[in-house]
Amino acid sequence: METLTLNPISPPPIISSHLLSSATTVPQLKQIHARILRSGLDLTPSLLSRLLSLPLNPAAAPSLDYALSVLLHTPRPPSRLRCRAFRLLGPRRAIAAYARLRQDGVDFDRFDFPPLLRAAARAGEGEGGEAVVRETHGFVLKTGFVADPFVLTALVRGYAARGCVSDARAVFDRMPERDVVAWGVMLDGWCQSGCYSEALQLFEEMKSSDVAPDQVILATVLSACGRTGNLSSGRAIHSYILESGIAMDAHLQSSLINMYSNCGSMDIARKLFDEIPVKDLVASTAMVFGYSKIGEIETARAIFDEIPEKDLVCWSAMISGYSESDKPGEALKLFNEMQASGVRPDKITMLSVISACAHLGAIDQAKWIHIFVDKNMFRDVLMVRNALIDMYSKCGNLASAWRVFEGTPQKNVITWTSMITGLAMHGEGRLALALFERMKAEGVEPNGVTFVGLLYACSHTGLVAEGRQVFESMVHEYKVEPKLEHYGCVVDLLCRAKLLREAFELIESMPFRPNVIIWGSLLGGCRVHMDVELGEIAAKRILELDPDHDGAYVLLSNIYAKANKWDEARRVRRLMKSRGVSKEKGCSWLEINGNVHEFLMGDESHPKSKEIYGKLEEIIQELVLVGYSPDTGSVLVDLEEEEKKEAVLLHSEKLALSFGLINSTRGSCIRIAKNLRVCEDCHSFMELVSKAFDIEIVLRDRTRFHQYKNGVCSCKGFW
DNA sequence: GTAGGGTTAG
């Protein structure tokens, strides 16, 4: 540490000006401070002034604490120093300083408020930010002279940042004069609170005011259009820009591209993007995002690869693109590449990576990412914890999900919803309902997604009465407007409970046009509980909406086959073939020692393929002894019965299970993830294997978990 | 006052 040579006999006046101005670090100033105290002279204002002009590191808490304590020991610090202190100390200390100064009866002036309000805007939860905004507002009302545009704009921002957006609007409305910045702050305020239609409304007001929108305003409002997928408003703004002759700068160009990308209009986005001579990083990221969203992940990757200097945001966009496009393995690979290139992830990147792990369903990867989270200071970030809860649930590890959940002190609605949904996925419907009671007791308001989870919990556990009651309370007690997916859950609930006719009536009477998912639930129910007539209707409706829906053909044909209507079954299959529709290939994943192995139906590409088929043969022989015979009801192709048996025995989850058995010992657990729903034969196969081989099997299919133990599955038949 | 990436469901 650098030290200053102090002459112990030098007289006090020299300490004051010369030494103070030559100090360049906080430790040096501290030494001088000690001398000043000994000298008996009060030089704290000069000391404070010098201290606040040093480059104080915002991350260096000790020097900021020191600055705060000097400020608090300075009697009546002048306005200039108060301002600088509010700016430099960081939100928490700035608010503490303000509280003390107010107690000391300091007369604040209009220069104090903007930096103070900025601190209040940035303060964390529970640090008193909102109180500061309200008190400042009180000052402004009491002393009319403080009502200058800077203070009022800062107030608008302060209220908006604290989530009090209607208070912000009230201040904004009473401003005698509003410049373009004031409009911008208000506009941003609505956007930050997710009130995008109000933002658009405000933009309309602005157009008829005497202040003309500039590039910043337009970029903000375009972003609002993008976030809400409001293509028509976005296009109108595009026209407005062209008509009003506002200069198209790089920011605005990127905002436009982003708006079109977000609205799924990739043709227009592409055209605008191609017109840019030098590809802007932001515009490229918007393109990567847009192509990922419409499922053109290869095109997204091509643009991503062309970006010369990749920053954190574009890496994250590409990672999340893979994660959302059913390519979680690629997402994790890219995450490793990102780190190898020296880019550090932030919490938003982590959300995508954790979500990728959840989609992958691989528990070893999940544990690894959790360790990564802890090592990299993301442990206490609520959003990250929420994502971890979901990840563990989806990886079949409910106990770990629960541990993260209970270890989260400040739970928000997403925390509760994730845990409720996790319990639902694992067939713990009653626990999910109990958790909802706890959530209510703790005063957390459920949202629409919470109710999806709860209804889902009921339908996957066969709790019909409870499910109806949940739907009732959602509408009447919580005033959550039921959306299509809520009706979908109720339809699912009724179908699983064999109340097919009632489900059909609900579909016909609900205030939405049913989509393929809703009809699919009914069709699935008809398949399980055998209702040919309703099944035909459901399949017909699905194929009207989506002629390429492979599941509809498959299920309808299964229904006919099960009802011994062979001609009909064949007709459906021929129709499917003539329309060129093919069934999505079954695919299963199995994780061994951190490596994920992929199996397709009838797959022989695995290096240990021979061994796998040998093991499968052995398993079948053992199961036949306990009465197993292949159930071919789910086989679609026109085959002889023997060949069908063979086909069902080649299902991807059976191959994965064989490989799992080769690599595990009795009493352990095999985890398999599958892209489709598990078929009836595989389901009973797994049950039998769990008993015969004394092994636990956790199978995640498209909709839920099946945990096979000692011959029984946790789904109790609801699947 | 500034455009790009985000957790729960489907």
Image: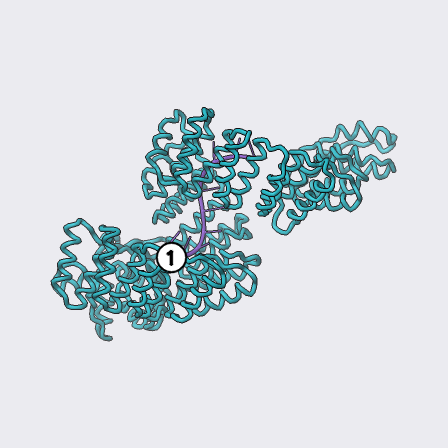
In the visual, does A17 lie left or right of B10?
right
Q: Which of A195/A403 is in front?
A: A195
Mark 1 belongs to which subunit?
A: A
Q: Is residue A230 visible to the viewer in this orientation of the structure?
A: yes
As displayed, is residue A302 above or below residue A598?
above
Mark 1 element type: helix
| Residue A383 placement (x, y as % from top left) | 51, 51
Residue visible at 43% across and 47% down? A352
| Residue A163 placement (x, y as % from top left) | 58, 47
In the visual, does A662 lie left or right of A558?
right
Q: Which of A584/A116 is in front?
A: A116
In the visual, does A504 lie left or right of A464?
left
Q: Which of A494/A666 is in front?
A: A494
As displayed, is residue A345 above or below residue A568?
above
What is the quadrant of residue A583 in the picture? Answer: bottom left
What is the quadrant of residue A243 in the picture? Answer: top left
Residue visible at 15% across and 61% down? A569
Q: Where is mark 1, residue-wise?
A: A485
Task: List the single residue furthest toward the bottom.
Answer: A626
As displayed, is residue A119 above or below residue A623?
above
Q: Quadrant of the image for the N terminus of chain A? A: top right
Amino acid under disc 1: Glu
Residue visible at 36% across and 42% down? A292
Q: Is residue A649 visible to the viewer in this orientation of the structure?
A: no
Instruction: Label the purple chain with its letter.
Output: B
Residue visible at 40% across and 32% down? A307
> Which color was chain A given?
cyan
